[in-house]
Image: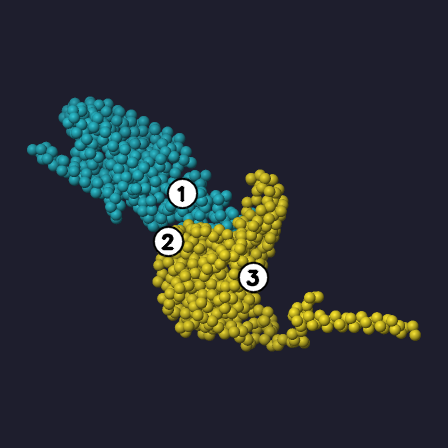
Chain colours: A cyan, B yellow
């Protein structure tokens, strides 16, 4: 009886969840706070974030609760909530009607999961961006007309998954999805745990079949940790781009960022862009700052409020002066003051009083001097600088400028 | 009688003296006719054996120098007295006169234009803002248009760019405009003190070759740049330091042979072009010091002069640059900011960020290089908090530290000058204190005078 009731209600509940998710993510004015809900539901993201950042952001509670439920109800999230799952399920069912055989053999999701969690131990979850909720959220970046091109990448990815589902029904949910694999792992672990407690004879067949799985998981974890270690060792600090405020350290950020595009959408001044591969393959589609038109305002922490994974850690507005985005640097070959011209633009726009003009006897002119303790790299000076085409004052990543 | 002169000698002497007297009479007649001698310098005695009454001179009493009380001759009485003939002062005088007031302007140098001409700050910065609108209109723009029509007076006059003028053309134009407006002028007068009655100004004291005199006025506009008059009257102000430089002009840049030297060895700081072909003006920022301290000003003048000369020697020793020469250093040292009025309102940097709208707006300021939007200047920024009948115009109006560098730009001096002129004329006519003047009337007249109020 129970099963049939569940079956009756499943589709309506899933539809409601899908509509709810879409409503949360639609670009309606004044509801940026809702953006974070959908991608934050993933326990895969939550656990990886805790492992990698070694801190717990309040928003991760959502994912942890879902994870807790998944321990007791196997794949509860997939069966009842997942909005991407519903879309792909629809495609898969259509394909099954067209007599395509469901995919059974692939188990890439498990490896994605193990590698990611392994990497997370060393602060760099490798494949966190393959989280289905992040993929689904990324779709909505298309609603920003300034980001159509980079937003289309997320759209193409989901379209690709739909096509795959048509060709090989259920390939994502059963074989590729790391979130699904994570729920499998959770329920298996709880069953194993229960079976040990209840004494072995109750569940004799299962335990033996789980050994290879456990071995593979451990292998994946080790491989993930090793890869993360290699990435960290080979990462050159000079290739670090400017990140939004509150960003974790560069490699952790690259791993933790789910590429959901929330920060880009939440930024009221449109200074966040998606990175192309300019800063290395691992930085692809991550958010970088662009001070061409505007700067990171002193009265704004919108992006940190909508990050589901803790890649951008929560920032208090009154702490913003201490959150270092980068450090302003002056090129005296371009600066108007170096050419005896009259300009006070950068000093005027510096909210933190970090710029002073000091008369240097040797050059017999003023030189802008930046106080590294006060400069947080907000980019106001860079926006204000009147030199073209290249700005005389530019914000560089703090690590780079300190060297 | 050998020592007696011979008859011939006598005749010769008589003849020569006769010729001399005759020629003398002839020249004298010419003098009467033409007023100026052709054969040499001429001087006349205005008063012989004159002794000045020294009872009002300073005296030494117990080692202290004491200036006794004395009555000052009143040079003139007027409705609006403008102290300072820079961009702000000229705009104020013309605007007040056009608004119907009797106007007198005094200027410490022998020409108008202040730092614009005497300081050789030839570049017009700040009359544009982000967007298509030129924010400095009114008398400032009228001057630009007239400079357009003069030959070789202004370059780079196109929308969105900062023009450069010729100082002599501006000096000439300002004389022309002041004469057209029929403003009473006294040059070579240094406004040194205020005539104060209780908490209000009733005129100004000036020092010149004619001695210490006073001009009595209904409203005084302090366009001295340093706020000399409102400070003397006891108005509250902020004393600031700023960079003091000295501008120079260099010539023969059209005769440089650039092929003679490599790219890296070429002198870089050669300034920017002026309307005079081959001549650049070279700005200098200089150290941040107190522009009200005479010892500092002296030190700066001498230090900069040495630097400019030595730099020119270096430039000339570069192959191909040997014909470049130092045309002049500015007669007036480049003091940027000294006293800033504590006004009823203050122009703040947040006004730009927030696009603050003032109900008592009297002008709109721009950006040096159109890098940001326009900002409004409230009437209250010209009015001292605690002294009446004096209005500040130009770089010394009430503004915060970061806005001073925008407020002091030439176009903004036109804008605040014109507004102060109109406001002074209105309060003189309505017999009220400037702070009580009808702001809608001031704004209406400003608009009639083609000022832009946002």
- Judge whether B271 appears above or below A12 on screen: below
Q: Chain of mark 3?
A: B
- Whole-number angstrom distance, CA of label 3 to CA of label 2: 38 Å
Q: Chain of mark 2?
A: B
- Whole-number angstrom distance, CA of label 1 to CA of label 3: 43 Å
Residue B348, image quadrant: bottom left
SS at mark 1? loop
**Residue B294 shows which numbered tag?**
3
Measured as percent of width and height from the top left, residue B246 is found at 55, 55
SS at mark 2? helix
**Residue A326 shows which numbered tag?**
1
Q: Relative to B157, is A159 on the left or the right?
A: left
Pick the front one: A121 or B421: B421
Q: Chain of mark 1?
A: A
Pick the front one: A178 or B253: B253
Residue B384 in sight: no
Q: Residue at x 31, y 33 (%)?
A: A125
- Dot 1 and dot 2 residues touching (CB under 8 Å): no
- Furthest-left residue in view? A1
Measured as percent of width and height from the top left, residue A165 is found at 21, 29
- Identify the mark nearer the N-term, 3 or 2: 3
């Amino acid at each position: 009886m129970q099963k049939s009731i569940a079956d009756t209600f499943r589709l309506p509940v899933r539809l409601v969840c899908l509509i709810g998710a879409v409503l949360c993510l639609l670009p309606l004015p004044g509801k940026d706070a809702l953006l974070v809900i959908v991608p934050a539901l993933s326990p895969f993201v939550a656990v990886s974030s805790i492992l990698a950042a070694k801190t717990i952001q309040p928003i991760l509670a959502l994912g942890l609760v879902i994870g807790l439920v998944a321990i007791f109800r196997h794949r509860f999230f997939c069966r009842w909530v997942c909005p991407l799952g519903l879309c792909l399920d629809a495609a898969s069912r259509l394909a099954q009607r067209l007599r395509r055989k469901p995919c059974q053999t692939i188990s890439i999701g498990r490896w994605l999961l193990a590698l990611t969690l392994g990497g997370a131990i060393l602060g760099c979850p490798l494949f966190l961006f393959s989280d289905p909720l992040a993929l689904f959220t990324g779709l909505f970046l298309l609603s920003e007309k300034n980001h159509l091109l980079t937003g289309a990448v997320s759209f193409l990815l989901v379209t690709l998954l739909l096509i795959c589902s048509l060709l090989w029904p259920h390939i994502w949910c059963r074989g590729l999805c790391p979130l699904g694999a994570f729920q499998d792992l959770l329920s298996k672990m709880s069953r194993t745990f229960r079976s040990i407690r209840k004494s072995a004879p109750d569940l004799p067949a299962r335990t033996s079949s789980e050994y290879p799985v456990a071995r593979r998981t451990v292998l994946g974890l080790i491989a993930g940790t090793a890869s993360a270690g290699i990435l960290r060792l080979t990462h050159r600090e000079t290739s670090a781009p400017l990140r939004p405020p509150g960003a974790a350290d560069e490699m952790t950020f690259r791993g933790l960022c789910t590429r959901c595009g929330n920060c880009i959408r939440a930024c009221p001044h449109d200074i966040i862009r998606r990175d192309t591969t300019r800063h290395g393959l691992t930085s692809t589609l991550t958010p970088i700052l662009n001070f061409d038109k505007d700067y990171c305002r002193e009265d704004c922490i919108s992006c940190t409020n909508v990050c589901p994974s803790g890649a951008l850690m929560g920032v208090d507005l009154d702490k913003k002066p201490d959150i270092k985005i980068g450090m302003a640097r002056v090129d005296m070959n371009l600066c108007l003051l170096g050419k005896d011209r009259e300009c006070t633009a950068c000093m005027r726009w510096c909210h933190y009083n970090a710029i002073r003009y000091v008369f240097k006897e040797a050059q017999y002119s003023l030189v802008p001097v930046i106080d590294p303790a006060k400069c947080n790299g907000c980019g106001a000076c860079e926006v204000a600088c009147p030199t073209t085409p290249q700005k005389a004052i530019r914000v560089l990543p703090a690590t780079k400028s300190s060297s | 009688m050998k020592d007696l002169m011979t008859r011939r000698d006598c005749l010769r002497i008589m003849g020569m003296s006769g010729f001399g007297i005759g020629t003398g009479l002839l020249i004298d007649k010419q003098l009467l006719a033409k007023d100026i001698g052709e054969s040499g310098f001429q001087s006349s005695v205005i008063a012989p054996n004159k002794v000045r009454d020294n009872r009002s001179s300073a005296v030494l009493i117990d080692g202290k120098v004491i200036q006794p009380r004395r009555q000052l001759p009143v040079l003139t009485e007027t409705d609006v007295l403008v102290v300072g003939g820079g961009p702000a002062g000229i705009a104020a005088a013309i605007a007040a006169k056009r608004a119907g007031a009797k106007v007198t302007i005094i200027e410490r140098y022998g020409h108008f234009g202040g730092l614009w001409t005497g300081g050789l700050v030839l570049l017009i910065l700040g009359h544009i803002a982000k967007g298509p609108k030129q924010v400095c209109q009114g008398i400032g723009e009228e001057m630009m248009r007239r400079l357009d029509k003069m030959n070789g007076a202004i370059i780079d006059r196109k929308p969105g760019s900062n023009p450069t003028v010729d100082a002599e053309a501006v000096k000439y134009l300002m004389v022309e405009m002041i004469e057209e407006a029929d403003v009473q002028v006294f040059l070579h007068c240094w406004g040194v003190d205020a005539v104060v009655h209780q908490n209000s100004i009733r005129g100004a004291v000036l020092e010149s070759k004619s001695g210490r005199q006073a001009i009595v006025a209904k409203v005084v506009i302090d366009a001295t740049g340093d706020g000399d008059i409102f400070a003397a009257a006891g108005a509250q102000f902020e004393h600031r330091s700023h960079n003091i430089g000295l501008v120079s002009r260099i010539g023969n840049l059209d005769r440089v042979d650039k092929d003679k030297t490599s790219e890296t060895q070429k002198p870089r700081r050669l300034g920017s072009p002026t309307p005079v072909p081959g001549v650049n003006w070279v700005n200098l920022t200089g150290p941040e010091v107190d522009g009200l301290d005479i010892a500092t000003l002296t030190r700066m003048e001498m230090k900069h002069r040495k630097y400019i000369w030595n730099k020119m020697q270096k430039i000339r020793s570069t192959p191909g640059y040997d014909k470049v020469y130092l045309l002049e250093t500015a007669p007036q040292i480049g003091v940027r900011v000294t006293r800033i009025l504590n006004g009823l309102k203050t122009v703040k940097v947040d006004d730009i960020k927030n696009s603050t709208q003032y109900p008592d707006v009297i002008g709109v300021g721009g950006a040096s290089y159109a890098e940001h939007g326009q900002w409004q200047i409230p009437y209250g920024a010209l009015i001292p908090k605690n002294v009446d009948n004096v209005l500040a115009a130009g770089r010394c109006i009430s503004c915060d530290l970061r806005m001073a560098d925008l407020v002091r730009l030439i176009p903004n001096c036109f804008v605040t000058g014109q507004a102060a002129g109109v406001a002074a004329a209105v309060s003189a006519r309505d017999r009220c204190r400037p702070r009580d003047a009808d702001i809608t009337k001031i704004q209406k007249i400003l608009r009639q005078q083609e000022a832009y109020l946002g």
